[in-house]
Amino acid sequence: MFKRILVAVDGSPNAWEALAHAVALAKGVGAERIGVVHVRPSLTTLSHAYGFDELAMHHLNLARRMERELKEGETQSRALLREAVARIRDAGIEESKVACHAEEGPVVRKILDVVQREGYDLLVMGSRGMGRAAGLLLGSVTQSLVANMPCTVLVVECREHLRGEC
Amino acid sequence: MFKRVLVAVDGSEHAWRALDHAVALAKAMGSETLGVVHVRPSLTTLAYSYGFDGAAAPYGTFAERMVAELKAAEDRSRELLQEAEDRVRAAGLDSVQVVRHAEEGAVVRKILDLVRREGYELLVMGSRGMSRAAGLILGSVSQSLVANLPCSVMVVESRTEKEATGHETAKSTAES
């Protein structure tokens, strides 16, 4: 039922909490694999964020900055996945059961691809990640992933005030 | 981690599948309470589905029919919750306390209220329930519950083999 579990991480506290839940679940059901996916921005995503007009200006500075950001993105992604693996290992899961997926590009599309390609049967994620739009219950990435339902999905609720209530 | 788990059932295969997942999860997580909720239609909900014009018609037979339907819905709800508890027990989950919640009224509202009132930490449900709108990945009730996110939510994927062909193919290639 939960043989192959995938957790989406982005460095946000919510994602770490989702990871903790996924690990507890994986241990409880004796999952054969726990995967961690992080999607970093590609050049296209970055260009969108900066706006194409700015890109079209051929500023050497901008090109350098983009290059640096892409490089940093890769380094950060690697560090993030390393931390995730360390957390899973510290929780007592053999490293042979852990898989890392460092992806680059549009977040939702890439996660859906990983689920399908690798045949995950459970996707765990926080209710929202890095985006901090006030009042949003569900982040846009989470919302989009649930709407696409590539497999069974667990959305971990991380609002502090709710936890107090419960 | 999830001490109190709630699963929503409506008699559909999707919901039974969700129940199986909730049981596996409760076992794995050592949950203390497994709630099962079913929401049956109230007079108001029924009146909506018949249309108010129909309800307003002063037919004695019509009123009788509504009363009979409400009564039948109550019986079905009781049987459904009983079956759910039987299934949990049959799965050998003895350590967990099973609580039945028979509710009446607006489905989403009632489930949200219950989660908050009883402090459930995880809500498990099928990706869609009784209604059979073709091509819908996520049913309206599931969608609305996720959007309201009263607590952590697990949506159990329940597309038929045919609908999920791409996914199944990927799985088999991954395993081979």
Image (cartoon, rainbow, N blue to C red):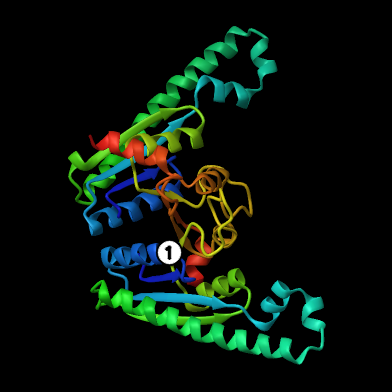
**Image label count:** 1
Instruction: Report the front residue among B79 and B93.
Output: B79
Tell me the quadrant of the picture where the N terminus of chain B can be found: bottom left
Relative to B72, A123 lies left or right: left
Residue type at numbered disc 1: Glu
Relative to B47, A151 lies left or right: left
Residue A100 is situated, as x and y percent measured from the top left of the image, at 31, 35
Relative to A93, B57 lies left or right: right
Instruction: Report the front residue among A154 and A13.
Output: A154
Tell me the quadrant of the picture where the C terminus of chain B can be found: top left
Q: Which residue is drawn at 22% across and 45% down?
A: A89
Q: Is residue A44 above or below residue B76?
A: above
Q: Residue at x 41, y 29 (%)?
A: A103
Q: Check disc 1 and report the residue beneath it.
A: B13
Asked if one can make out residue A127 in the rendered structure from this viewpoint, the answer is yes
Residue B124 is situated, as x and y percent measured from the top left of the image, at 43, 64
Q: Residue at x 36, y 65 (%)?
A: B22
Circle 1 Cα neighbour tier, 10 Å, few/some/many (<14 / 14–19 / ≥20): some
Chain designation of label 1: B
Q: Is residue B100 above or below residue A39?
A: below
Residue A101 is situated, as x and y percent measured from the top left of the image, at 34, 33
Q: In this view, does B68 lie above or below A138?
A: below
Q: Residue at x 30, y 57 (%)?
A: A25
Instruction: Report the front residue among A93 and A78.
Output: A93
Instruction: Report the front residue among A106 and A72.
Output: A106
Asked if one can make out residue B123 in the rendered structure from this viewpoint, the answer is no
- What is the secondary structure assignment of the residue under circle 1? helix
Relative to B49, A91 lies left or right: left
Residue B154 is situated, as x and y percent measured from the top left of the image, at 44, 58
